[in-house]
Amino acid sequence: MIPSLLRWLRRIEHAAAMSLLIGIFALVFVATAMRYLGSPVIWAIEVTQAMFVWLCVLAADITLQHRGHFSVPALADLLSPAKRRVLEIFNAAVVLALLAFFVRYGITFAELSSGRPLPIVGVSEGIATAALPVGFALMFVTVVEQLVMRWKGIGEQEALAPRDVM
Amino acid sequence: MLLLIGVLFFILLLINIPVAFALAFASVPVFLVSDYMPPAVALQRMYGVTLSYPLLAVPFFILAGNLMNTTGITERLLRFARLLTGWMVGGLAQVSVVLSALMGGISGAAVADAAMEARLLGPTMIERGYSKGFTASVIAFSSVITATIPPSIGLILFGFVNEVSIGRLLLGGIVPGILMTATLMTVTWMVAKQNGYEPELSEKPTYKELAVSFRECFWALMFPVFLIAGFRFGFFTATEAGAVVVAYALIVGVFIYKELTWKAFVQALHYSVIDIGMVMLIIILSAVVGHAFIIEQAPQEITRGLANFGGGPYATLLIVLGALFVAGMIMEATVNVLLLTPLLLPALTAQGFDPVHVGVIMTVLITFGGNTPPIGVIMYTVSGILKVSFGQFVRASYPFIIAMVILFIVMGLVPKTVLFLPDLLM
């Protein structure tokens, strides 16, 4: 039940992140072209910004699912497998506490901002700011899932090779 | 308080917590003790980052880079680089340097370039008798050129976080990129001569061969020219340029080289999402720490400290660059740009340095830090692909490190090396 629900969630997230990336590209490209044709699309910036914050948090969660966030495993690798497992559980707890903190205050922030409309489009700003609590909640789910997998000792996933964009 | 943030951050980092979360966790105490920072402000800071329009250039350049690698542009540039330098002593190593410079015009990421070259050139080089350490280090060090020639994601991030003109920064990277190419080619030539590494081609190419190959890569080689002209005449901003690059990669891939398939397109999107997730989480969460730094007045403290230290502007520059060199050894590049440069740049501009001049040097130096042990993402990547031990890598990297340090000193002493093109064109 839960695994198949998670699988669906992941599929939707992945499709949403890719669509947002293409959508943002298309919007900025068309807006640039229209600016030259003399009829700028004034709402484009606002809409791209709202899409961008969603892209950021969804992509961050997808990267987390692939264990692609940069970390320094050198010291942890020196530990015995049993000790490393303890450390991993401790680390997951630290990250979960942080994410819970962000979800909690992310909701406050989204509520505060939802009263404001976006200046041009007129929709509540909450449509953009809600991305933060939702995104951190998704990351919370991912870390819990990885913790459960680790606990059961199944599906141990190799970390992605270190990547950097610079 | 700042010390507490620093200590907490390093402890979390060493126990293998992802750098983005370590940064955020380390700044939590500031929110808990301070009266004027309710926790919702932290979230508001994160949201503020995503409202930055220039920052959208980053996902675009990431996507464009991943697309380029699937469109057949890379192979064409490799053939061109091989004709240009394959006849020299240490032919394949020279090809690797020149290929990085050519790739620099379409890609903004050193690590991606290093990974690509390690797969494409590395095994052949080792087969032809190049030592493993030398093969890995020439590929790793030359990839820094890619991050210098526009578009450069590092310079875009620097411009974003320090509010410096991104157009001028990108133009400022060109001459240093060319100087670095020449420097690395010289070192490669010296090492190759000493070790008797043979040329790859038995004779120089004819003009006809070069012309044919040039025409094949015309669209890729014209890209930086197009980009620079765009900035020069104000046709587009960095973000718009990013969107134009993506369109360019799609058009070249689908209509000109006809090698971009649907499957490859989806694959490029997938990798881009992962790259974007990694870098954006760091950017978003480091905004929280950055805010804590500002509340604690860290930049002012550092500026005052360095000014009181005396010795004049060049002593300050030397200290700052030395600090960044050490930071590059122990920290990952995007974090160094996002957290350290805003702390250090005010000290330099207060002493009369141009932010574009020192900005380019700082960013290149930070990228170069990907090659210095113990923590270096470029070094990890190349050594991992080529199965080279860090010891072998480090032993072979000394000549490159010495040459690059000399180049950084020259760039620091002669501002024109960086500012020549931005002053001429903008």
Image (cartoon, rainbow, N blue to C red):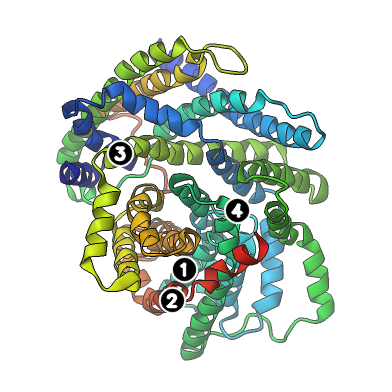
Task: Name the residue that disc number 1 marks.
Answer: B141
Residue B167 got which mark?
4
Q: Chain of mark 3?
A: B
Q: Nearer the viewer, mark 3 or mark 4?
A: 4
Q: Earlier in the sequence, mark 3 or mark 4?
A: 4
> Quadrant where the C terminus of chain B lies?
bottom right
Residue B413 got which mark?
2
Q: Chain of mark 4?
A: B
> Which of the pair A155/B227 is nearer the observer?
B227
User: In what element is the residue under mark 1?
Assistant: helix
What's the distance in space between the residues labelled 4 and 2, CA to CA? Answer: 23 Å
User: In what element is the residue under mark 3?
Assistant: helix
Q: Earlier in the sequence, mark 1 or mark 4?
A: 1
* Image height of B290 relative to A142, above or below: below
Q: Nearer the viewer, mark 3 or mark 2?
A: 2
Q: Chain of mark 1?
A: B
Label 4: few (<14), some (14–19) or many (≥20) C-alpha neighbours in 10 Å: many
Tell if the residue under mark 4 belongs to the same chain as the one under mark 2: yes
What's the distance in space between the residues labelled 3 and 4, CA to CA? Answer: 27 Å
> Which of the pair B404/B424 is nearer the observer?
B424
